[in-house]
């Protein structure tokens, strides 16, 4: 799958959609495919301040537990209740309905540490 | 050393890759962990049927006048009373009352077939050889020499019955019959490791890949899917079947791991019997089934608590699709806390999550 152009990406396979000062975060289609059937997500608490690239939660597939890193720092404003109720949504709609949490961005400088879609696709096709 | 060696390939390796399987190392082999997805394959086996490649499993043929008594001496369950074309679960024992491996023994007209775990193939081959001096039986090691396919699920009989030359419907569970499947001669056994009805097919390596493909075609209208080891592990755990290395091991007696029913102390002497007589009365830790009360899955190795005390650890864990997605696990816990209904805590990433001890199996198929 070609990654959506309007998003930015981390090397840890998360995506970010900036919408003013709010950033929405999810994992990429590449990541959900590599993980296999996702059965549980543990997301950061609303109100928590998180820093870019820190470990903020857990994604569990049938076979493995993986850390969830945030591609952007700031204050968590919302988590997606739909993926808490049905973690398989992350497999089915990684870039859309399967978003994980939203952050009130603390620094525009975080963008410098992220990849655009074409750079991310190069990263994932090389490995 | 073993990690550096290239993986062994089953005769179906090319077909697995063609079918889009995700291959991972398992017991020295490259094996399909999943094709379309573990949960989909699990559902196929529970509701329709799934087809597995189990050619990595060890197979030994034991021949000779004394084959039954020789096997009886190495194992805890009865061999001599096994009828021709019968199959029986058994444990290869060590001297201290622990388990070298769990196996199925099939009684064929001129030999016993022993099917052992792939991970224990070398150990069992060495053990059998060492226990055969002076030479009393003839041991043929067929590991990697003969393929094994397993068709599992409620539609298995309907898929297979018109393509074999034996009366499948008349075969009892845990029996076997030599016969031909889609024109391929081999051994058909009504056994499995999923908790569903099904058949295991022992066939020549060079016929296995074409047979697997043909069965997939024949099973298409019944909803048959190829299924990998990922689904198999959840299926067996739900069905309360132990996995060697998790629920079974050299240091655990069958009384601890829950196979007391497969220990026949009155069958005559066997390796480990003297130790088992002692251990039967000891308050040793036991394998129990756990249902977690929340939604967070446990994992093997996590610690189990009563209050502030560690009382054991998780040995296998999964979310159980057959139980509505509830997290389940087996744990080895102190003898004092093994009662069904007891509530324990599982430590998951530093937080305690309550779990209840339940009777095994977690899942039992409806009667036929």
Image (spheres, helix red, strand yellow):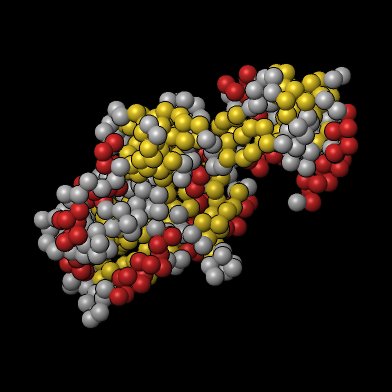
Q: Measuring 63% from the left and 18% from the top, which residue is drawn there?
A: A81
Q: Position of residue B283 (x, y in %)?
A: 22, 46
The image quadrant of residue B154 is top left
In the displayed structure, would residue B230 be above or below residue B366? Answer: below
Q: Nearer the viewer, residue B276 or B310?
A: B310
**Horizontal side of residue B85 vs B219, given as left or right:** left
Q: Measuring 60% from the left and 30% from the top, which residue is drawn there?
A: A41
Q: Measuring 31% from the left and 75% from the top, which residue is drawn there?
A: B129
Q: Measuring 40% from the left and 34% from the top, which residue is drawn there?
A: B308
Q: Position of residue A58 (x, y in %)?
A: 61, 34
In the displayed structure, would residue A8 be above or below residue B55? Answer: above
Q: Position of residue B14 (x, y in %)?
A: 60, 57
The image quadrant of residue B277 is bottom left
Q: Nearer the viewer, residue A59 or B8?
A: A59
**Horizontal side of residue B297 vs B236, given as left or right:** right
Count numbered badges in the picture: 0
In the displayed structure, would residue A24 be above or below residue B20? Answer: above
Q: Position of residue B63 (x, y in %)?
A: 25, 71
Residue B194 visible? The answer is no
Q: Quadrant of the N terminus of chain A?
A: top right
Q: Nearer the viewer, residue B52 or B23?
A: B23
**Horizontal side of residue B159 vs B269, given as left or right:** right
Q: Residue furthest front?
A: B308
Residue B229 visible? The answer is yes
């Amino acid at each position: 799958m070609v990654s959506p152009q309007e998003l930015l990406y981390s090397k840890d396979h998360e995506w970010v959609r900036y919408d003013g000062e709010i950033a929405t975060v999810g994992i990429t289609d590449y990541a959900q495919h590599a993980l296999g059937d996702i059965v549980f997500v543990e997301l950061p608490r609303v109100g928590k301040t998180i820093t870019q690239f820190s470990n903020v939660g857990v994604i569990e597939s049938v076979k493995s537990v993986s850390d969830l890193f945030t591609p952007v720092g700031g204050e968590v404003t919302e988590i997606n209740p739909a993926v808490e109720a049905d973690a398989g949504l992350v497999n089915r709609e990684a870039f859309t309905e399967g978003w994980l949490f939203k952050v009130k961005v603390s620094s525009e400088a975080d963008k410098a540490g992220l990849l655009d879609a074409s750079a991310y696709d190069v990263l994932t096709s090389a490995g | 050393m073993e990690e550096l060696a290239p993986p062994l390939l089953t005769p179906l390796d090319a077909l697995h890759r063609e079918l889009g399987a995700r291959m991972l190392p398992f017991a020295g082999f490259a094996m399909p962990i999943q094709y379309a997805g573990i949960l989909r394959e699990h559902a196929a086996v529970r509701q329709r049927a799934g087809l597995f490649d189990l050619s990595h499993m060890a197979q030994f043929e034991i021949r000779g006048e004394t084959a039954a008594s020789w096997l009886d001496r190495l194992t805890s369950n009865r061999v001599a009373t096994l009828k021709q074309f019968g199959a029986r679960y058994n444990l290869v024992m060590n001297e201290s009352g622990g388990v070298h491996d769990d196996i199925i023994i099939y009684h064929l007209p001129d030999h016993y077939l022993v099917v052992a775990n792939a991970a224990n193939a070398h150990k069992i081959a060495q053990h059998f050889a060492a226990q055969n001096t002076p030479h009393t039986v003839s041991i043929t090691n067929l590991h990697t020499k003969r393929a094994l396919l397993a068709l599992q699920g409620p539609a298995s009989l309907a898929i297979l019955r018109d393509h074999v030359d034996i009366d499948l419907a008349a075969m009892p569970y845990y029996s076997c019959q030599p016969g031909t499947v889609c024109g391929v001669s081999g051994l058909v056994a009504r056994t499995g490791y999923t908790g569903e009805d099904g058949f295991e097919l022992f066939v020549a390596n060079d016929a296995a890949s074409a047979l697997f493909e043909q069965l997939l075609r024949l099973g298409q209208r019944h909803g048959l899917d190829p299924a990998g080891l990922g689904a198999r592990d959840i299926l067996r755990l739900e069905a309360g079947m132990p996995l060697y290395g998790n629920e079974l091991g050299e240091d655990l007696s069958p009384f601890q791991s829950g196979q007391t029913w497969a220990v026949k102390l009155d069958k005559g002497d066997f390796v480990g019997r003297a130790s088992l007589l002692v251990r039967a009365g000891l308050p040793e830790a036991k394998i129990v089934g756990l249902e977690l009360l929340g939604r967070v899955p446990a994992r093997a190795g996590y610690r189990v608590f009563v209050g502030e005390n560690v009382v054991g650890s998780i040995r296998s864990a999964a979310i159980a699709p057959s139980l509505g997605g509830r997290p389940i696990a087996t744990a080895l816990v102190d003898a004092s806390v093994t009662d069904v209904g007891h509530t324990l805590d599982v430590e998951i990433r530093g937080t305690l999550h309550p779990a209840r001890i339940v009777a095994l199996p977690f899942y039992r198929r409806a009667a036929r």
